Image (cartoon, rainbow, N blue to C red):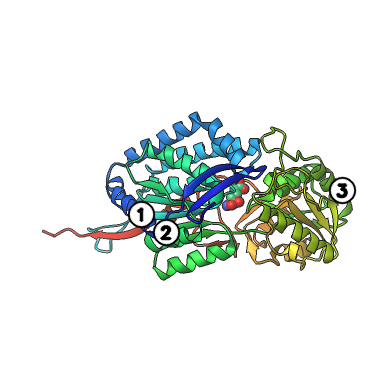
């Protein structure tokens, strides 16, 4: 690979190059932004019904090509086939949902002090929104940003992760067929292309690591443009003594290890209140029962991690955990296949202060931490810099309700896995997990538009 191209390779078969694209330099990025800005003018001032129809057509086309998109996702980012099919279906749902939101009320009226004027607040698009997206949800994340951006009248330039350029290119081709020329485009590249994008757009939405998210937010704030960054998690599941043990174990195992733990919503800490043994055994059994291997197989839950570096990072974290006094209930080693496989790894015996219990690894590895009582479980859960999503397993709904106010978390799930997102509800975290307004649902309009307050006074008699 030369420095002026980026390429993606299959994580289960790293010899297979999936896509190669030229890197967009600064001038290519500004050309894409200028074209989107030109196209966005007519798009925003035209009929909202037109936007509804275009996004509906995109949904129809994606639905018609579901299998092709899912197969590419399996091949390019190693997502297990079942999850890949689910993500394509989610993408179709996102497009249909935001297609309709284009027709929702776009403002409010207020009683004017003089009783005669019309006082209103109306939402207007920003112009061109830059999207910087990760490889782990190569369709859903670009779509849950692009669909509302477009629905509310913006143009979009997408810079996807280099590991997911094949999926992004297919999405670009699909949208090109239904949108005005230049309104949506993608630019390939790494940090430089991302910087060039932040330097030229009118708003930025980012999903990725904490460090890059902070840099993007600082650069965007320096230009006085709206920014939203969704970053990491160190998500906990609190298992109370009255939980339905087997159901909780199955749910936590899938949330920790599904797609090899490569979700910002994955469960990384399992905080067991009271005697930890019975639940820990049930969890280890559930993890051992997960299908591991070729992501193309329908039974696979845990495929490879994205790159050799990612595999190294997981194995280093496991080794560090061992040195810190942890022991492995399952896993702890690389898989023996040719791709970037790691065994699903469950660690016990660590202090909540151990690195593995504080920092995000983004792999199939989780820690079991015992807690004396619910208060201690809350303290452990809140004791990290992240606050994206937390789950509580209990039959005591009064207790669950009380915990809603005590856990520092953007989303709370009761008797449900930390992973999994509803595109029609607000999504985002507290503390280092997020910067800026929430994504998705009705919250999306807050980010992708800006309010103008308008007073219209009668000239008088
Ligand atoms: C999910 O759990 O279905 O990057 C979505 C991520 C999150 C999305 C999670 N922003 O992993």
* Image coordinates for residue 44, horizontal then vertical, percent: 30, 48
- Mark 1 neighbour class, 10 Å CA radius: few under 14, some 14 to 19, many 20 or more: many
**Number of dots carrying numbers:** 3
N-term-proximal mark, 1 vs 2: 1
Instruction: Label 2: state its secondary structure.
Output: helix
- Mark 3 neighbour class, 10 Å CA radius: few under 14, some 14 to 19, many 20 or more: few
Quick check: marks 3 and 1 in contact, CB under 8 Å? no
Instruction: Label 1: state its secondary structure.
Output: helix
* Image coordinates for residue 154, horizontal then vertical, percent: 36, 50
What is the CA distance from the residue labelled 3 to the residue labelled 2?
49 Å
Which is nearer the eye, 141 or 370? 141
Q: Which residue lies furthest to the front in this view?
A: 2
User: Residue tagged by mark 3?
Assistant: 281
Instruction: Label 3: state its secondary structure.
Output: helix
Mark 3 vs mark 2, foreground winner is: 2
* Image coordinates for residue 267, horizontal then vertical, percent: 70, 53
Q: In this view, does 130 lie to the left or right of 212?
A: left
User: Residue tagged by mark 1?
Assistant: 33
Q: In this view, does 392 lie to the left or right of 147?
A: right
Mark 3 vs mark 1, foreground winner is: 1
Res. 272 mark: none
Quick check: marks 1 and 2 in contact, CB under 8 Å? yes
What is the CA distance from the residue labelled 3 to the residue labelled 1?
54 Å
User: Residue tagged by mark 2?
Assistant: 197
Q: In this view, does 392 lie to the left or right of 126?
A: right
What is the CA distance from the residue labelled 1 to the residue labelled 2?
8 Å
Q: Residue furthest top?
A: 64
Which is nearer the eye, 384 or 39? 39
Mark 1 within 8 Å of ligand 1, using the beta carbon:
no
Q: Which residue lies furthest to the bottom in this view?
A: 222
N-term-proximal mark, 3 vs 1: 1
Q: Residue furthest left?
A: 461
């Amino acid at each position: 690979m030369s420095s002026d191209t980026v390429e993606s390779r299959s994580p289960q078969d790293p010899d297979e190059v999936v896509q190669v694209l030229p890197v967009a330099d600064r001038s290519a990025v500004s050309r894409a932004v200028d074209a989107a800005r030109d196209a966005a003018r007519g798009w925003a001032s035209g009929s909202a019904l037109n936007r509804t129809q275009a996004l509906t057509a995109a949904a129809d086309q994606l639905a018609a090509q579901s299998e092709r998109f899912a197969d590419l996702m399996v091949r390019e980012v190693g997502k297990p086939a079942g999850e890949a099919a689910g993500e394509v279906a989610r993408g179709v749902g996102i497009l249909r949902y935001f297609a309709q939101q284009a027709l929702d009320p776009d403002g409010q009226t207020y009683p004017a002090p003089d009783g005669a004027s019309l006082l209103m607040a109306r939402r207007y698009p920003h112009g061109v929104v830059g999207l910087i997206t990760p490889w782990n949800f190569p369709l859903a994340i670009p779509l849950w940003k692009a669909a509302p951006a477009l629905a509310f009248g913006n143009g979009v330039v997408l810079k996807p992760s280099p590991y997911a350029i094949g999926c992004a290119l297919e999405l670009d081709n699909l949208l090109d067929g239904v949108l005005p020329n230049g309104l949506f485009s993608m630019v390939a590249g790494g940090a430089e292309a991302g910087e060039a994008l932040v330097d030229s757009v009118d708003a930025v939405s980012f999903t990725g690591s904490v460090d890059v998210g902070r840099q993007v937010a600082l650069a965007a704030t320096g230009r006085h443009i709206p920014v939203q960054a969704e970053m990491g998690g160190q998500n906990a599941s609190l298992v109370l003594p009255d939980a339905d043990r087997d159901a909780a174990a199955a749910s936590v195992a899938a949330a920790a290890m599904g797609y090899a733990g490569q979700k910002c919503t994955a469960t990384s800490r399992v905080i067991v209140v009271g005697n930890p043994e019975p639940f820990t055994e049930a969890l280890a059994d559930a993890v051992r029962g997960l299908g591991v291997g070729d992501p193309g197989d329908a039974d696979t839950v845990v495929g490879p991690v994205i790159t050799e570096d990612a595999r190294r990072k997981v194995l280093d974290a496991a080794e560090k955990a061992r040195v810190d006094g942890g022991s492995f209930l399952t896993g702890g080693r690389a898989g023996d296949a040719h791709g970037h496989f790691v065994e699903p790894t469950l660690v016990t015996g660590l202090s909540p202060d151990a690195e593995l219990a504080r920092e995000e690894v983004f792999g199939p590895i989780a820690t079991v931490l015992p807690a004396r009582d619910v208060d201690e479980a809350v303290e452990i859960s809140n004791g990290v810099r992240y606050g994206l999503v937390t789950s509580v397993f209990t039959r005591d709904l009064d207790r669950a309700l009380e915990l809603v106010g005590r856990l520092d978390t953007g989303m709370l799930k009761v008797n449900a896995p930390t992973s999994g997102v509803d595109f029609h509800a607000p999504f985002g975290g507290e503390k280092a997990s997020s910067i800026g307004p929430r994504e998705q649902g009705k919250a999306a309009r807050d980010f992708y538009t800006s309010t103008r307050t308008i007073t219209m006074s009668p000239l008088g008699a």
